[in-house]
Image (spheres, coloured by chain):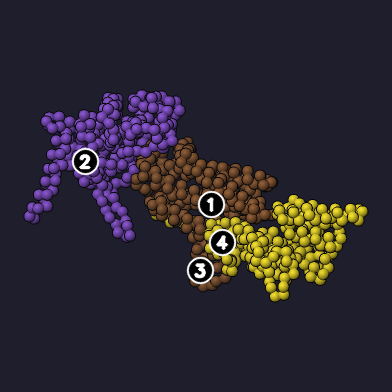
Chain colours: A purple, B yellow, C brown
Amino acid sequence: MPPVISFREATKVYSSSHLGRTTKKIGLIDFSLEVEKGEAFGLLGLNGSGKTTTFKLALGLLALNSGTVKVFDLPPSTRAFYSRVGYVPELPYFHSFLTVESCLKFYGRLSGLSNLEIKTNLERVLWETGLVTHKEKRISELSKGLSQRVALAQATIHNPDLLILDEPMSGLDPLAIRDLREYLSRLLEEGKTIFISSHSIFEIEKLCHRVGVLKEGRLIRVLKRKDWSDSRGGLEERFTEIVQNDRLTEALLKTSPK
Amino acid sequence: MRYFLTLFLSLFLINGFFSSLGTTESLPDFSSSKHPVEILTLLNLGLRRLAADIAMVRLLIYYGSSEAMADDLNPPQGVTLYPGILPRAQEILSLDPSFSYVRFYAAGALAFNLGRPDEAIELLREGLILDPDNSKYKAYIAAIAFSQKGDERQAVEALSPYLNSPKTPSMIKNVAAFIYLRLKKWPQAAELYQELLRSKDAGYRKEAKKMLEKIKKYHYLKGN
Amino acid sequence: MKTIWILAVDSFLENIWNRVFILVAIFGGLLIYASLLFGVLAVEEELRVLMDSGLALIEMVTLIAGIYFSATMFLKEIETKTIYLVLSRPLSRLEYLLGRVLGLILSLLLIMVLMSFIHLILLFVHHWSWRSSYLLSLAGIFLKALMLVAAAVFFSLFSTSSIAAIVFSGSLWVLGNFTQEIRFLTQKESGLPALLSRLLLFLFPHFEILNWQGGANDTRVLMGASYAAVYFLIFIALSWLVLRAKEF
């Protein structure tokens, strides 16, 4: 069975022109990765390391400069692909005048669901994300935690096989984080695939089967669960170690005589 | 890129093709206007009719201002009252040539109130050039010509088909009613004053009421 | 088609919620003020002035709203990341573009209907009798709005700055009202100035042919409407070409 997500030597360079001067910035370089069905894969990295770029490439929102990316063995731009993917961007915005229910119905309709499917799926996601009691509320009345639940609900309303979650825990209180983790674990049990990034190493550690460490657009290490479960300091220690070692190597390469 | 260029070229050609639909006649002339920026701004926004309307309001204010007494029909020799009426009216009509009210209002004021029939005829002739079949312009020109000759009866006869029209300025109706009074044609004068009671200009309504009372009294005195 | 409609309704509702009523309230206030003022000043031509000033205000508000909404709509969606939530669904970018533009057009239509309603009340209060040429005037304004909306959408997608898009579309609006003067120049001048003037006629839109306030015959209406429709479609197609290749 082909992997759910497959990057092969993917490179993305952002170029911007100002007054005839072109500036280039590396988003991702020689990135190769495969994520299997039913797997939770976490991306860790400092700010600007290329996590969001990776997600956007997987979603077809950005175009590659070289290499390939396939999701469900399809280039990420077809209708068949999008109907199987749910996406939560970092700090998404919803129309403040909509109620939770109308907002989710809108995304359900946009995902091509029939009225009957929307009715059934809406009840399910409202229940699973703990939004049942808030469904009549307007988005403008929601706390950050509840908004984040709406973000997750809109990504799962069409029951996708793959969830791409960019910092879904950002701004959530500990209880909301726990609820979110439990919900994602249930989705994994159902056989869904999760591709997630978070600054909360602790949550990634609990949820993910494998973790990739990104630095300045390069995937510098992929860790399996046993790599950090054996370590006393857990994933946090492994991550810090990897990033620091990489820095040291870089510094040594710079100072060593040719 | 190929599609892009094709579409831009199509846009270019479509603009070129449809440009022939526009007109070249009667460009607005506001070179002597006191408010060129205002007019230019409105033209920039495609609001040519509104520019004409505002200029008309300015004309009405100008003619109603105390630069000279509006009802002074015999100005001292050498003094031109309201010299700006003709250029202002021409400016308005260059903005909207179909604004006939302005043409008749200004021509009436110039010919019958200010004693400058030549300017009035100039304005009406410009109208005839744009609309050669307009009999109302011809009637006005005839009325002014008769008035110049002192033949008030013929003057008012020339105007009579248009006097009951709501589009005829109250000022013209008032002048005509006054001529009818001078000609002792009481019923015609009374009819016009009745019409003027419905005028939107309060001044003419007041005048009409007063004159109607006078006509009534005169009739009683004469035993009619 | 269904997706386009879903997106259109969403944009329409958002516009109603955020902007429409403020604009209509401002319009209503201005119109009532203008009618009272002109009623006193224009005396016998009060109705004409009330008609012209009302239609001018309807045109101004519609075109300004059209340019502003179009120039900011997509950039706001990118800024708030709403675009990611939409484009990560099973829909094409063309559907997305058409849906959003349709929603915007519906919002402008609603603005026009509400403003015309206030305007008509004022006209009827002043004993105006209905004429179908009123609808023709509104149609001309609407078609101008369509042309500017399409151009502003294209500029906003192309320039990635709403200010630049507003400036470009605003310039197009102003220059598109000057083609009569330019055409006059092409006839009066010769040589290079005439050639340059002719070139400008090919570059700028001709809003003048959609000024139907003073009345227009069927041919003029048909030609004007065809021009606006083709102009709109070309700019929408250009916008689609930009959007198709755009990265978010």
Q: Amino acid at mark 3?
A: Leu
Q: Amino acid at mark 1?
A: Met
Q: Which residue is mark 3?
A: C195
Mark identifier at residue A45: 2
Q: Is residue C224 visible?
A: no
Q: SS for tag 3?
A: helix
Q: Amino acid at mark 2?
A: Gly
Q: Which residue is mark 1?
A: C60
The residue depicted at 33 percent of the width and 34 percent of the height is: A144
Q: Which residue is mark 4?
A: B39
Q: Nearer the viewer, mark 1 or mark 2?
A: 1
Mark closest to the chain's N terminus, 3 or 1: 1
Q: Are marks 3 and 1 on the same chain?
A: yes
Question: Quick one: label 2, few (<14), some, or many (20+) residues within 10 Å?
Answer: many
Q: Is residue B160 left or right of residue C83?
A: right
Q: In the rendered image, which quarter is residue A168 located in?
A: top left
C-alpha distance separating marks 3 and 1: 32 Å
